[in-house]
Amino acid sequence: LAVAVAALVGGTGLAVSPGAPASHHHSFAAEPALGAPTKRFTLTAAMTTVRVDEREVKAWGFNGQVPGPQITATVGDILEVTLRNRDIKKGVTLHWHGYDVPNSQDGVPDVTQAAVLPGQEFVYKFRADQAGTYWYHTHSVSDLGVRMGLYGALVVHPAPITGVDVTLPVHTLSGHPLPAATTETVAAGSPVRLRLINTDNTTHRYALAGTAFGVAAIDGSDLRGPTPLQGTAVLIPAGGRYDLTFTAPATPVGLQVDGRAVWSTGEVSAATAGWPALDPLTYGAPAPPPWSHYDRDFTLVLDRGLDLHGLLPRYAHTVDGAAYPDIPTEIVHLGDTVKFTIVNRSMVVHPWHLHGHRVLVLSRNGKAATGSPLWLDSFDVRPGDVWEVTFKADNPGVWVNHCHNLAHADAGMMLHLMYA
Ligand code: C2O
Ligand code: CU
């Protein structure tokens, strides 16, 4: 399977809105001020089949491919992306994972828009203000939709790029790893940036062998003072992204995911299984936090148990003992500094994900973060973990936060953050 980077450019710019937005919707006002798009893409969702290891596997693709076309932009671009749904009966949306778009463009069915049904389309438009590595995916029946293949990379460059820039979404399709091992010729001395995107429901372990490297960015935010690493693996949570940078040596370099070769510049045989994993909370150069007073303070207790709040009791992945839509909404005011304490009392990992905002990690299990300021949108809250994070309420609307093991999210581990 070729990982195509071509995108269909065109589209009329005419929106056929599939339905009225939910009544609690806020911010359509952002759109008219944007001006004419500088980059246009059309993503058509349709049933397809993809060849995986000699077998035909049923998939849902964008423009006939899994992952969908990579959307590449430069800071300042005005992106217009037309989503069309040919025949996905469960509906499709585009959520810009990690990208802090205006609320109306966030792509959450029944919260910011209606799901786009077969024959319908929806036009997303936003300005690319943040550089970095992100991804897009459907948020309608999100676990099934993403596992079937409705996702792709979103990469925003700070300026026109020089050097070698490679984007590697974890390629899986309904649990089958896609045959994505690629070999690329890279001239010795070239600067290389590997953009790693975990589009799966579970954590993956990435090991770069044959060179020293730095972690330049996590979840699209640059790290301060990244020091060189070697013989160290990185664990990327579901939904998360790491950008690894290095200068190509004269000898081959290879990247493994969970021990499987996915990208290299030549023959590399390295036993990476015993490598220690980087703790991002202690990596890089610290800086004082931008605020130390919190206007709002929420505690989220993640667990598994009986949700008694709905019409019928059900066993679910719960937050504060309830499941979506019965978990109380987090109410904030524009300009608030907000603190979340997230506690995992269950036996499984919950990769927490907040829409519309990135959070600064304060501490994990009582230990303060001592490395570079760590702004994340996806982080693994492991069994027994307590995470303290903070963010500025600077993007009005109604947003969701949820577990990015999307099976858990679909089973109720999701709640609303709302600006009063
Ligand atoms: Cu990538 Cu609501 O998630
Ligand atoms: Cu979970």
Image: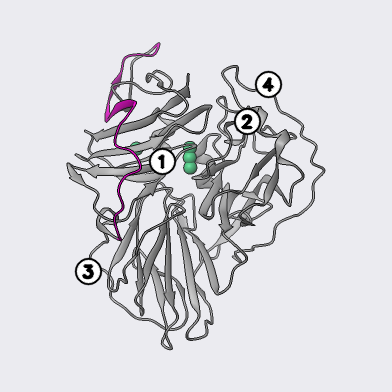
Q: Can the viewer see residue 143?
A: no
Q: Which residue is mark 2?
A: 115
Q: Which mark is residue 274?
A: 3
Q: Is residue 140 above or below residue 4?
A: above
Amino acid residing under circle 3: Gly
Q: Which residue is mark 1?
A: 404
Horizontal side of residue 311 vs 229, given as left or right:
right
SS state under label 2: loop
Image side of residue 14 versus residue 107, left or right: right
Q: Label 3 to label 1, Cα distance in Å?
A: 27 Å
Which residue sits at x=27%, y=38%?
388
Q: Dot 4 corresponds to which residue?
A: 20
Identified by mark 2, the residue type is Ala
Closer to the chain start, of discs 3 and 2, is: 2
How packed is label 2: few (under 14 Cα within 10 Å), some, or many (20 or more)?
many
Mark 4 or 3, closer to the camera: 4
- Residue 235 in the figure: left or right of residue 154: left
Front of the two marks 4 and 2: 4
